[in-house]
Image (spheres, rainbow, N blue to C red):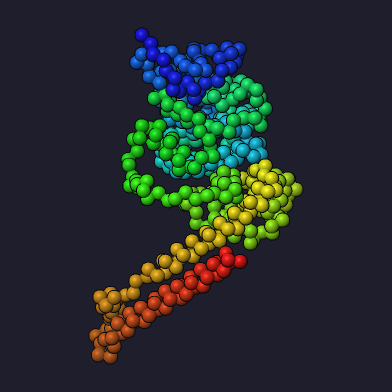
Amino acid sequence: MSTKVTTIATILTICSAGAYATAQGHDKGPLPGTHEVVVASGVTGGEVWGANYWPNVTLTGHDNKKYQFFDDLLKDKVVVIDFIYTTCPDACPLETAKLAEVAEVLGEQMGDDVFFYSISIDPKTDSVEVLAEYAKRYRAGKGWTFFTGDEEDIKLIRLKCGLMDLGGQQREDHSLDMLVGNQKTGRWMKQSAFENPYMLATIIGDWLHNYKQPRKNLLSYEKAPALQNMTKGESLFRTRCSACHVFGQGDGLTRQGPNLLGVTDRRERKWLERWLLEPDVMLAEKDPVAIEMFEAFNKVAMPNLRLSQLEISQLLDYMTKQSLVAELADRTASLTSAMQLKPIGSCCAKKSADSSNKQHEPSSGSAKNSDPNAGATASIKSKTAMGTTAMVSIGMGLIGLLTVALRRRN
């Protein structure tokens, strides 16, 4: 008896994968067809997409260890697979920076519950040493490995992942998607690396583990904020820049590049326009500011985002406005903190006086000459100083808020 399974086949399928695998001598069993796969009743997804489907070719990690692709890397694991090359001038750095964000959100799950595999499509250039430096540059930690190997083996893996079109043999044509899945359950899906890192972490760290993570205090959809109309500049920043940059305090995640708070005030507009247009050229020309940033931020080069002049103008306008918004938020937080300073109450004053008397307890010979109110007087002075400090902080905060508001108005 058999049943037709169509769910995962549409995700992993490539029509020509079978022909390519056969030509390369890698045909180890049925490949997913264009529409459906016929399997015996009771067979699990993990068995369908198991050793008979995935090639068990050898790859070498940036740790200089050899791995069998299925036996060591996929079997019974939840994995993220993407394909990069280290000399890529645009998409790969963004993709890798985004995965670094996702890895940070996943935290302790990395290397225990979840494994990231970044496989080079240029193995002739990307040696173990090159990949090790690349991994270090992007702070790849436990559970994230960069791989090289035989070029034909890597092409086969790309085909099996559904991330290679036979018509696109050039490096520049490689897919920017990644494959995430749970081999044991047979749940696989293609995802964009440029999704929100928290959403990706939820898919990888929770959904693919059958929701085993403990439920947190989830808010009702009724409390969800209203959706705002996103400007073109904001859309560009979210998709092209947010993996490496933030304004002000941000969301707490580590970024690869500099904080952009006030960047349009600190840099000349013409310099910023050219930097967004051709950062690779400016680095090659050894522009002093570009080189300084390159050295300061772990030698992660600013990728060429392929922006038009109109997109650059929209992006810079967004950076200016967002810097003001972030500065306003930071100053508001500081003001709120200053206003929450609590004055010392009478009980605390008494304790302080008692403590002060004990700390300055005179010897028996001079006890009669000591001032019994010295401790209370010191406490009053301390309380007055704290109140003065709080008022100064509040005043400075109000001045800052007024300044930012006037800048926004202008």
* The image quarter in which residue 324 lies: bottom right
Task: Please identify the residue farthest to the right as the structure is shown.
Answer: 285
In the image, residue 282 lies at what x, y percent?
Answer: 72, 48
Q: Is residue 313 rendered to the left or right of residue 234?
A: right
The one of 128 and 327 positioned closer to us in this rendering: 327
Q: Quadrant of the N terminus?
A: top left
Residue at 30% from the left image edge and 82% from the top image edge: 375
Decide if residue 13 is in sight here: yes
The one of 360 and 286 positioned closer to us in this rendering: 286
The one of 295 and 52 positioned closer to us in this rendering: 52
Decide if residue 297 is in sight here: no
Q: Is residue 362 above or below residue 162?
A: below
Task: Please identify the residue farthest to the bottom as the structure is shown.
Answer: 369
Residue at 38% from the left image edge and 32% from the top image edge: 209
In the image, residue 404 lies at what x, y percent?
Answer: 55, 66
In the image, residue 288 lies at what x, y percent?
Answer: 71, 54
The one of 293 and 63 positioned closer to us in this rendering: 293
Q: Is residue 79 above or below residue 362?
A: above
* Number of marks present in the image shown: 0
Residue at 51% from the left image edge and 72% from the top image edge: 399
* The image quarter in which residue 365 lies: bottom left
Q: Is residue 325 rendered to the left or right of residue 182?
A: right
Q: Quadrant of the C terminus?
A: bottom right
